[in-house]
Amino acid sequence: MNLKPTIVIIEDEKNICDFIRTTLTTHGYKAITASSGQEGLSFITSHLPDLILLDLGLPDMDGIEIIKNVRGWSLIPIIVISARSQEEEKVLALDSGCDDYITKPFGTSELLARIRTSLRRYQASQAMADPHPLYTCDDLTIDLSKRLVTLRGQEIHLTQVEYKLVSLLAKNSGRVLTYDHIIHTIWGPYADNSNNQILRVNMAHIRRKLENNPAEPRYIFTEIGVGYRMKESQT
Ligand code: CA
């Protein structure tokens, strides 16, 4: 699948936001922009990006609040982009859990280098945390280190959220995962009832892509009223 890495940019200064978006999209990233903290948080939970670029001075909240919120449920890399150059503010952002810090003004190559480093570090830590990077069952293979899903040798294209769901189920194959467990693992502790519907919609899309006959699934089973179970990996 080799998804384009998705980056959420939270920045209220339009010029800077446009500059970053253009830089990222021309260098192979998918960029999603938010101009307020609330919008940013909602894009983070709906798109589950690979990385967050965060301005600290936002119209509705301090960027530090966003770092604390996200760190409550995820280790997605966060790079702070700020006009603030005082040391104590960098320390506060880093202590709150951001991964790196870029001070405005900054150049394209510096930005891209910092992004590559953070993504590499995060992917390496994810791969090490996963003892079984390969799921195989009948015609379906999921290579968790390459983020590659194939069915009868054909690559299957999943969205970011679909992939997170499938990989969570694959890592726990053979076990029933409850709706609540799945929702809180994917969308964090602040997930609410609206996520139940989002989960159902995403699972329906996944089944259409992976199952010959979604009404008689071979790989992902519904445990009615409880959750989902993925057929046990054969590796
Ligand atoms: Ca700002």
Image (cartoon, rainbow, N blue to C red):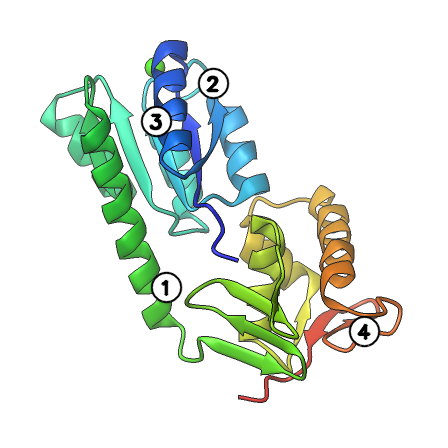
Measuring from the top left, give residue 165's x and y in whole percent: 61, 60
* Residue 177, image quadrant: bottom right
Q: Which residue matches tag 3?
A: 23
Question: Circle 1 — which element?
Answer: helix
In the rendered image of this protein, does residue 173 appear above or below residue 160? below
How dense is the environment of label 2, judged by Cα within 10 Å: few (below 14), some, or many (20 and up)?
some
Q: Earlier in the sequence, mark 3 or mark 4?
A: 3
- Residue at 71% over, 52% down: 202
Ligand 1 quadrant in view: top left
- Residue at 37% over, 10% down: 15
Question: Circle 4 — which element?
Answer: loop
Q: Which mark is residue 217?
A: 4
Which callout, 1 or 4, points to the residue nearer the camera? Answer: 4
Of all residues shown, which one is farthest toward the right? Answer: 215
**Which amino acid, mark 1?**
Gln
**Which amino acid, mark 4?**
Pro
Q: Which residue matches tag 2?
A: 35
Q: Earlier in the sequence, mark 1 or mark 4?
A: 1
**Which amino acid, mark 3?**
Thr
Of all residues shown, which one is farthest toward the left? Answer: 87
How dense is the environment of label 3, judged by Cα within 10 Å: few (below 14), some, or many (20 and up)?
some
